[in-house]
Image (cartoon, rainbow, N blue to C red):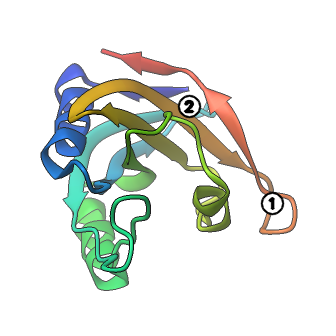
Amino acid sequence: MLKIGAGQYEALRRHGEETYPHECCGALLGRFEDDGSRTVTSTARCGNTRTDSAHNRYNIDPRELVRIQREGRERGEDIVGFYHSHPDHPAQWSPTDFAEAHWVGCSYVITSVEKGKAAVTSSFALSGSDESDKQFVNEPIEVR
């Protein structure tokens, strides 16, 4: 389960609307709970560095990700997941999303943005032990 505050939830949905018709992306920071859930305490907007197909792909600059991770750790937060938008496509992971997901144990949140307006937001936990057996599992989102 992904637990997220209403303000952070709305912020990541708005981010998708603001970048439409391109995909937005960002990191979810917080803590891993003993029960296997993840609690989001802050979000970090990232720039989509894809120039070839930003309307249906995203990439976070590794240097930006290292900075976000370092700043989060200074606040006692870990990266617990990532988010991005799907302009005019369902809030369901794509084969590309799966191939590029490497943070086992993290949540991957996708918001469908239809004609510029955030619609459905879904979350998928990346489970497994490594690349050979990873899989996305539907996970509920608890908005607080």
107 vs 95: above or below: above
Q: Secondary structure at mark 1?
A: loop
Q: Quadrant of the C terminus?
A: top left
Q: Is residue 9 left or right of residue 62?
A: left
Q: Label 1 is placed on what type of residue?
A: Ser
Q: Residue at x 44, y 40 (%)?
A: 110
User: Could you say which disc has been placed on residue 129 in the image?
Assistant: 1
Q: Secondary structure at mark 2?
A: loop
Number of disc labels: 2
Extreme left residue here? 18
Q: x%, y% of residue 81? A: 45, 50
Q: Residue at x 25, y 76 (%)?
A: 67
Q: x%, y% of residue 118? A: 27, 29
Q: Is residue 134 left or right of residue 69?
A: right
How far apart in space, not on screen, are marks 2 and 1 (Cα)? 17 Å
Foreground of the two, 116 or 73:
116
CA neighbours of label 1 inside 10 A, class few (<14), some (14 to 19), many (20+): few
CA neighbours of label 2 inside 10 A, class few (<14), some (14 to 19), many (20+): some
Q: Quadrant of the N terminus?
A: top right
Q: Quadrant of residue 139?
A: top right
Q: Residue at x 41, y 28 (%)?
A: 121
Q: Label 2 is placed on what type of residue?
A: Ser
The residue identified by callout 2 is: 37
Label 2 or label 1, whichever comes before in sequence order: 2
Q: x%, y% of residue 142? A: 43, 17
